Image: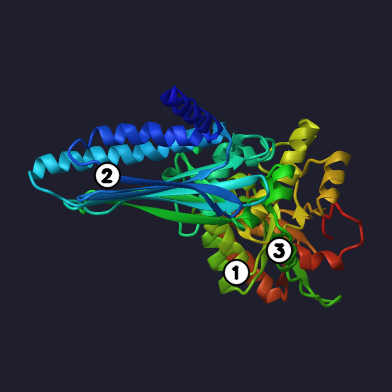
Amino acid sequence: MKNEKKWVKWLIVLAVCSPFIFVIAKNSQAINSSLQKKTPSIEIKDEEIKNGIKVQTESKEADAYSSFVMIPFTEIEEIDVPIGDWAFEQEEIFYEKFENEKLKSNKEIAAHFNLQTDIHKASDHFFSFVLTAEQFIENERRKSFVRTYTVDIKQKSFIELFDLFDKEKIETDNLLQIIAEQANPAISKEQIGETKELNWSVEGEHLAIYKERENDAKQESTTTRHEISLLHLHEYMEDSYKKLLISENLAEKLKKSEQEKKIKVRELKPDGKYVALTFDDGPHAKYTEQILDILKKYDAKATFYMLSRNVRHYPEIAKRVAEDGHEIGNHSATHVNLNATKEKRIDAEIIDSKQQIEEMIGYTIETFRPPYGEYNQYVLDEAEKSDQSVVLWSVDTLDWKNRNANSVYQATINETEPGSIILLHDIHATTVDALPLILNYFSKEGYECVTVSELLPLLEDKGPGPYFGN
C-alpha cells in the first residue's frame, strides 16, 4: 500500500511538470545507454530566466567527458519539443562519436560538449533563439555549428524568414540577392542557399545569417555570422512585422537616412548655358563604366535612368555612378510599355522599382522616365504619389537606331540648345565612341553638362511633369 502511494505521487509530479522534462529524460536515456562503463552525474535546472524566457539546463560529468546543454523553455509543447529533440540529438551524435574515437585509439580520451542559447527579444511574443553547439574531442579540432529558431509565442508557432516579407513586394530570389548584397561581412547568394535551410535570427536592429564553414585540412568547422541592417529590408516587410521590428530608434535612423540620401542639387544661374545628358537602360557590365571614365575626363555630370533588374545584377556599378556625383533615375523594372499593361503592373514598375534601386544604391530617387516615353494619366498619378517627377527628353540622338558614332554626334549638336535634355543609352558601344565627340563640342561651345534635377528648376513649371526640356 505504501509503495502504491509513492507511485501515485510520482505520476502526479510528472503530470504537472513541463513536457520538456520528458524530452530530457527520453534523450538522456538514449545517450546514457551508449555509455555503459561509467554513469555520469546529471543535474537538471529549469528556473533560470533570460530575456523574458525560461531556460532549461542539463549538465553531465564523468571521468572522461562532460557536457552542458542550455535550451529555451516556453511552456509551449509545439515549440519546446522540436527544439529539445534537435538539441539532444546533437548531444547523442557527439557521444557516439566520442565512443568511436575511444575504440579507435584504444585508450582513454577527454571530450566535452557545450550547447548554449542566446535569446533575442523583439517583443513580448516575438523571439529568436540562437543555439550554438560546440564539441571538443581529444583527437580532433573544435566543431561549432548553429541552429536558429524564431518563434511567435502568441501564435504558438515557428516563423519562417519569408513570413516577414510582403510577397507582392519581393520574391524569394530577390530577397536573397538583397541579403547577399547587404551582408556584412560579405556573402554570396550561392552561399546563402535555400530559405528553408537558412539559419537566421532578428537581433536588435539587424537580421543575422549564420553559415557553417568546414575546414577539412584542420578537421574543424566554425560558424560565421553575417548581419544586415533592417533599414535595408524594411521596405519589403509585411506591415505587421514592420511595426513590430522597426523600433522607435531605428525609425528615427531611417528618417535621418532618407533625409541624408536626398540628392544635393546645385542652384544654377538663370542665364547659364546648361544641358542634361541622360543615359537609359543600364547599368551595363562594360559600357557604363567606360562612359563614367569619359564623363570624369570632361568634368561632366549626367543622369542615368536605370532598370531595377539591371541594378540588381550590377549594384557596384550603380553605386559608382552615384559616388562619381551623377544622378540616378528610375526607368522601371523591366522596360515594359506602361500604356499597354495593367495598373498593378504599373505600380510595380514605378513604385517597387524605385524602392529597389534606392535600397541598392543608398539614396532617394526623384525622377522617373517611362520606357519608350509611353505614359498615361495613371502613370503620372502614380509617379506623383511616389514623389517622382516624370522626365522625358527634347533631343533624341537615335543611338539605339543609328549604330554610328558620327551620326549620334551630328544628331546631338544639330538639335541641342540651352536647357536641352538629351537622350542616350549606356548599353551601346556606339554611344561610348560618340560621347567624347559630343563633350568636346559642348566644351568648345561653352555648355555645362548638369543633372536633370539641377536643370529642372530652370525649365517652365509643369508640376510633376512630364518634362521635355527646351
- The residues bearing labels 3 and 1 have C-alpha atoms spaced at a distance of 31 Å
Residue under pointer 3: 249
Residue under pointer 2: 40
Q: Residues within 10 Å of mark 3 (few under 14, many from 20)?
A: few
Q: Is residue 86 above or below residue 407?
A: above
Q: Say which of marks 2 and 3 sits in front.
A: 2
Q: Is residue 425 above or below residue 2?
A: below
Disc 1 marks a residue whose amino acid type is Asp
The C terminus, quarter of image: bottom right
Could you say which is closer to the camera, residue 396 or residue 376?
Answer: 376
Query: Which element carries disc 3, helix, strand or loop?
Result: helix
Asked whether the viewer can see residue 247, the reply is yes
**Image colouring:** rainbow
- The residues bearing labels 2 and 3 have C-alpha atoms spaced at a distance of 49 Å
Could you say which is closer to the camera, residue 376 or residue 220?
Answer: 220
Locate residue 51 relative to residue 37 in the image: left or right. Answer: right
Query: Which element carries disc 1, helix, strand or loop?
Result: loop
Locate residue 59 relative to residue 157 in the image: left or right. Answer: left
Is tag 2's residue or tag 1's residue first in the polypeptide sequence? 2
